[in-house]
Image (cartoon, helix red, strand yellow):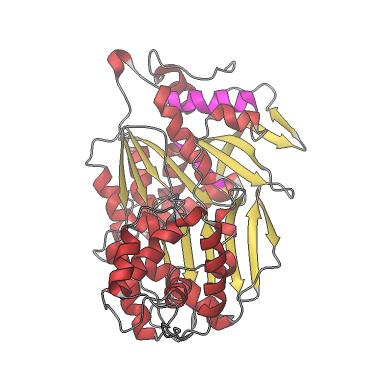
Amino acid sequence: MEPQASAASSDRLSPSQVSSLLDEEVDFSTSHLMAALRTAWASRAETVDVGREELDILREALVNSLPLDVLSPFSADPDRGEKIRRCITRLLADGVVKLPPSPQVVEAVYQRVAGLGPLEGLVRAPAISEIVVESWDSILVEREGVMFATPLHFGSAEEALEVVQSLVLLMGRRINRANPVASFNLPDGSRMTAVIPPAALRGATLAIRRFRATRFRLTDWVEKGSMSAEMAAYVAQGLQAGLNFLISGTVSTGKTTLLETCLTELRDLVGPGGAVRAVVIIEDTHELHPDYRYVRELVTSEEIGHTMGYLARTALRMRPDVIVVGETRGPEAADMLYAMSAGIATGLTTIHAAAPEGALRRMMVYVQMAGAESPYREIPHLLGDIIGDSIDVVIHLTRLPGGARKVAAIVEVEGYSAQRFALREVFRLEGDRFLQAPDYKPAPRVARKLGDGIVPGAQSPGTIPL
C-alpha cells in the first residue's frame, strides 16, 4: 500500500504541479468544486502565519507583475481575484519568499495583500457611489446621494489598518506613520483617500468615491429634475457665447458633475469650417472625464513642485480657448482670473461655497493667497472690481435632504461696488419649482457676449427669450 499523506502535506503542491496547473485552461472561477475549496481554504487561512517582511516582498512583486487595473478594488476584470491568486501561486512556486505554494498559504497571502475584508461586496455593488470607513467598527455607504450606515465592520482595528495599507500599497503608493495620508485616483477614475494613525485618532479611515462611467448632458439634468429646460438652454447658450462660469456649492452637491457636463456640451459647439474649442484642464487629482475630444489634461505633482498655479500659468501658453480648473481652492485663482479678465480664454471652475456671493468672496481670498506671485499684487484693493468684471455667471448647486442634487440659483455678476458684488438673478429654486426672474434682462456684459460671441452654426438644446 502507498503510505497515506499527512494532513500537513496533503494540501501542498510541488513547483512542477503548480506550473502545470497554471498552464491549464480551466475556468476555476465558475467551478462549484473550486468555490467550495476556496471557502475551506479561506477558513484555514487565518491560522497561516505570514510575516510582515514576506507580505511586503510579495506585495511589491504583485505590483511589478500585474497591471494596476487588475489590482484595483474596482477592477472591471471579472477574474481579478483568480488572476491575483494565480500570480501569488507562481511567485511562491518561484521561491520569491520561503513559503509553500499551498492553497491555504495562497489564500492567506491574498486576504492580507489584496483582500478587502468586509468591503469586498460593497465594491461590487454598482448602486453604491461612495464607501467610507470611519473606524474598524463603522462603515458607511452612499446610495443615490444619501449616506447610510451598514452593519458591516472589520474584526479589529488592526485588520482595518492592514486592509487600508494594502489597498494603498497595491496601487504603488506609500502610507505609513511618517506619511499617514494618501489621496489618489484608481485606474478606473475612482478616488481613494486614506488616513492612518497618528493622523487618524480612531484608527485607519478610508473614503472611496466610485467613478461614474455615465456622461451626463444638460438634457439628462432636466430629465432627472436637477434643472429646468430653460436653465439648460441658458447654460448651453452661455457656453456657446464663451461666458465665464463659476460653479459653486457645498460638499457633494454635483459641482464636478456639472462642470464635466459643461465640457461634454462643447462637443456640439462647432464653428465655421468645423472649428472646435481647444480645452486645457488643470486638476489636483484626475476627476474630470468629459466626452469631448479636444482636451489637454494637466495634473499637479508634489514631487516636482508643479502646483495648480504653475500649471495655470503654463496653460496660458498652450493656446487655450477654454481653461478649466477642476476646483479652485488656493492661489491658482489669480491665474485663472487673469485668463478670464484678459480675454485669453473662457474660464470654467468650481468652488466650495454656501451661496453665490460667498463663492465670489472666496475667490477674492484665494487670489490674495497668491501673494507676490499674483498678477494683481500691485492692486489688491481692486480685486473685487476685477472679479466682478471677469466672472459672468455663478451656478449654485444644493443637495436636498433626500439626496437629490439641484441647481439652486443661477445669477449673473454685474460688478462690484461698496464692498459688495452686484448680482442679477436669472433663475432660482423655490420649493420644488424652478423659477425664472420676472422681467429678466441679461446684465450688460453678458448681453454683449451673448449678442456678439455666439459661435456661428453652433447648436444647443434650445434658447430662452433674452
- Quarter of the picture containing the C terminus is top right
Q: In the rendered view, does 459 fall on the left or right side of 374?
A: right
Spot occupied by residue 292 in the image (x, y as percentages of width and height): 38, 32
Find the residue positioned furthest to the front.
1
Q: In the rendered view, does 121 fall on the left or right side of 193?
A: right
Q: In the rendered view, does 64 fall on the left or right side of 383?
A: left
Find the residue positioned furthest to the right.
431
Looking at the image, which is closer to me, 319 or 269? 269
The image quarter in which residue 35 lies? bottom right
Residue in view at x 49 percent, y 42 percent: 213
Looking at the image, which is closer to me, 117 or 427? 117
Residue in view at x 43 percent, y 23 percent: 240
Whether residue 377 can be seen here: no
Residue in view at x 59 percent, y 22 percent: 441
Spot occupied by residue 254 in the image (x, y as percentages of width and height): 57, 45
- In the image, is residue 272 above or below residue 320? above
The image quarter in which residue 62 lies? bottom left
Spot occupied by residue 457 in the image (x, y as percentages of width and height): 39, 12
Whether residue 319 can be seen here: yes
Q: Give the range drawn in magenta.
A: 227-248
Q: Does the magenta stretch include residue 228?
A: yes
Q: In the rendered view, does 274 fall on the left or right side of 144?
A: left
Looking at the image, which is closer to me, 25 or 366? 25
Q: Does the magenta stretch include residue 114?
A: no
- In the image, is residue 217 above or below residue 64? above
- In the image, is residue 49 above or below residue 184? below
Spot occupied by residue 3 in the image (x, y as percentages of width and height): 42, 85
- In the image, is residue 387 above or below residue 275? below
